[in-house]
Image (cartoon, rainbow, N blue to C red):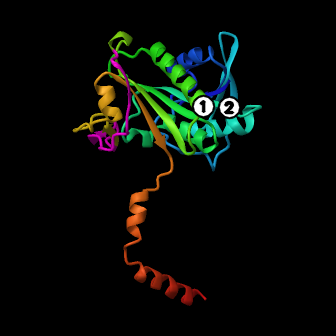
């Protein structure tokens, strides 16, 4: 099995090193990851600057390729340039910090998995809550075992798997729950500060606690000591609302289009 491994914490992060060690047992792993921290990069891609790639060695052996771009850039570069054959599966992680709730919209790790899915590769993201004890070795084992399931059963088009491990010792984890994504917003704030020169600058703060946990969601599971496995999809169409829109009166909009056409013609 050909496995593409990436992340958003950077190629030297402890999470990706642990994940590679676990995945080496089940396939041929190619690491293509950012050359530095890209947390919160979401699905950004590099258009106006060149991308640079360099080989990274650890303990005198090739570990992988460092890319001067975003996690999504890394996936594109891996599939289109660096790998001789497309991967059978893409694993993004282990991210240091849970990617639950609306955090999946900001996460570069989840975005890498989305990019893989867009390119037709069965893809998954693995993250671990680091608010307390973080057992990376165990999270890597979980990621490896989920990867085996993804490889065995495949995934429907436009989908990916998002795995989150709680901040507990492995013997304290209660089990696995299949969950939905929490949709409630997090408590956030802006911290206003002064630099030594007296100028004001701002630091985004918070964004980790949700006031009310939704039952059956990723946040509830992780907070209660369970590993959360959540199926996601990047087709953002709201099909229920699409049907409702058919009952709206679109006459004024259509007339406006016709008037605009007559003026331009």
Place residue 64 in its image quadrant.
Answer: top right
Would you say residue 199 sits in the magenta stretch?
A: yes
Viewer-nearest residue: 174 or 59: 174
State the image quarter where residue 97 is shown. top left
Would residue 169 be visible to someone looking at this image? yes
Rendering coords of residue 6 (x, y %): 58, 29
In the picture of the structure, the residue carrying the numbered disc 1 is 90
Q: Is residue 208 depicted above or below 170 in this figure?
A: below
Placement of 200 over or under 216, stated as above or below: below
Given residues 115 and 173, the one toward you in this image is: 173
Q: What residue is shown at x 40% (from left), y 68% (from top)?
A: 245
- Report x, y in % for residue 43: 52, 44
Q: Residue at x 43, y 63 (%)?
A: 242
Dot 2 and dot 1 residues touching (CB under 8 Å): yes
Residue for badge 2: 87
Left or right of residue 60, residue 18 in this image: left
Question: Which of 160 and 71 lies nearest the eye of the viewer?
Answer: 160
Horizontal side of 38 relative to 55 (left or right) equals left
* Residue furthest to the right: 84
Residue at 62 percent across and 14 percent down: it is: 25
Residue drawn where x is 56% and y is 18% of the image: 17
In what element is the residue under mark 2?
A: loop
- Tell me the crowding category of disc 1: few under 14, some 14 to 19, or many 20 or more residues within 10 angstroms, Cα based: many
Tag 1, which secondary structure?
A: strand
Q: Residue furthest left?
A: 211
Does 204 lie within the magenta span? no
Drawn side of residue 200 relative to residue 62, left or right? left
**Label 2: few (<14), some (14–19) or many (≥20) C-alpha neighbours in 10 Å:** many
Query: Distance from label 2 to label 1 (Cα)?
Result: 7 Å
């Amino acid at each position: 099995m050909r496995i593409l491994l990436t992340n958003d914490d950077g190629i030297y992060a402890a999470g990706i090193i642990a994940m590679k060690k676990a995945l080496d047992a089940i396939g041929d792993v190619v690491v293509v990851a950012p050359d530095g921290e890209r947390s919160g990069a979401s699905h950004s891609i590099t258009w106006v600057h060149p991308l640079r790639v360099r080989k990274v060695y650890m303990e005198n052996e090739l570990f992988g390729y460092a890319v001067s771009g975003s996690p999504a850039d890394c996936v594109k570069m891996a599939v289109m340039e660096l790998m001789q054959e497309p991967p059978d599966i893409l694993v993004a992680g282990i991210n240091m910090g849970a990617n639950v709730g609306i955090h999946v919209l900001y996460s570069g790790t989840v975005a890498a998995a989305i990019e893989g899915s867009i390119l037709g590769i069965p893809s998954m993201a693995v993250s671990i809550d680091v608010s307390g004890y973080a057992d990376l070795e165990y999270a890597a084992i979980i990621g490896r075992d989920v990867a085996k399931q993804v490889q065995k059963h495949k995934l429907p088009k436009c989908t990916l798997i998002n795995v989150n491990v709680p901040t507990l010792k492995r013997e304290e984890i209660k089990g696995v729950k299949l969950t939905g994504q929490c949709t409630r917003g997090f408590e956030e704030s802006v911290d206003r500060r002064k630099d030594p020169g007296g100028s004001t600058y701002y630091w985004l703060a918070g964004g980790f606690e949700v006031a009310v946990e939704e039952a059956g969601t990723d946040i509830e599971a992780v907070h209660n000591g369970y590993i959360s496995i959540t199926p996601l999809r990047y087709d953002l169409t709201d099909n229920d609302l699409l049907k409702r829109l058919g009952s709206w009166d679109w006459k004024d909009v259509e007339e406006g289009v016709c008037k605009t056409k007559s003026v331009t013609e």
